[in-house]
Image: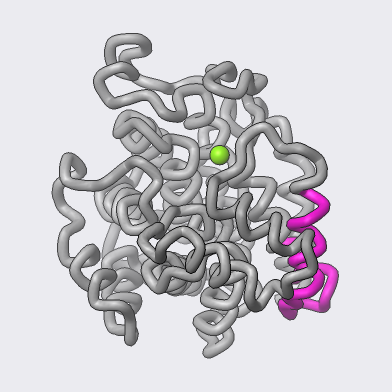
Amino acid sequence: MAFVDDTQGLSVLDLPDRVRGLVIGAAVGDALGAGVEFQSRESIRSEHGEVREYLGGGAFGWAPGQTTDDTDLAVAVFDTYLENDGNFDLASFGRKLENWYRSDPPDIGNMTRDAIQLLTEGVPPEEAGAMAWDASGRNSAGNGSVMRCYPTALFEPLDANLVSDSIAISRVTHADPRAADSCVVVNTIISQLLAGATATDGVSVASGGEMDPRINEALAHLDDPATFDARGYCLGTMQIGLWALLNFDDFEEGLVATVGLGYDTDTNATVAGALLGAKLGYQSIPGRWRSGLLEHDSLLQRADRALAMQ
Ligand SMILES: [Mg+2]
């Protein structure tokens, strides 16, 4: 099936190109940002100018082209759908999170760690995130569920399940409504893009949902990247991703600008890469970024298995 972008002057993209662009775009963003995670904008600028190549290194000693927890956990969501005939299963997802946690990953977010620790103690996945959130004082709304949310847009496109799955999957580790609703927004826009909507129309559809008012406030301010909280806050990461989506028709320039905003660079660029990849397609991703991505082939296989289930 072919989809046409008629208002942005983009070439005609077919669904496979968009789906592969979504999956590989997210991982490319993760790998591009990994080497400068936690660095300020100023520090990145003075040390690297712009980040246009996989640097590797960083706080966790990544290999160039290696992805991080963002992609690991997106794969956990992805494989849960693939193994359950395209439907989500919280118990299966919970077991994947526990197995990943026991593999001693180098980088793990605080709320993700606390919630998975509860899973290992026998707390059901429906309750773990809310318990961890209560224990944290209910103030924390990190971006740890937004970074892994995109597979739902592939398996539950334009469907009521897109909203309920996005929220349920977020709540396994991130129960704050800002985090859950950020996942709803990002997945709604991705599903619109996959169906051929323009970025502007996708954001407009997502803005019309019933959501936490702080989401609407964030969506009303997407113009000035200097105002976005790039330090791991779900709404800041959502805003950065949407800013990149709305302002760039060149995949590389959009991701370079996103990483240049600093701080939680891998996660911010994962979300931006997913959105830009779904808009612009796999062919828009620079060849050197595709070939240098260590997990490229296994991720592309997943994208193609998802396509075969559409
Ligand atoms: Mg990461």
Quadrant occupied by the N terminus: bottom right
Does residue 154 appear to the left or right of 222 in the view shown?
A: right
Q: Main secondary structure of the magenta part?
A: helix
The residue under the point 78% across, 56% down is 98
From this view, report whether residue 223 is shown above or below residue 55: below
Can you say whether 202 is above or below 229 in the image? below
Q: Would you identify the image quadrant in which residue 232 lies?
A: top left
Q: Quadrant of ligand 1?
A: top right
Tell me which segment is drawn in magenta.
78-100
The furthest residue to the bottom: 160
Residue 283 falls left or right of residue 294: left
Picture coordinates of residue 75, whole percent (x, y): 71, 54
Q: Position of residue 160 (x, y in %)?
A: 53, 89
Residue at 33% over, 84% down: 209
Foreground pick, 213 / 83: 213
Q: Determine the residue positioned at 61% across, 79% down.
A: 156
168 lies left or right of 250: right
Answer whether residue 195 is magenta in the image: no
Looking at the image, which residue is at 28% across and 59% down? 8
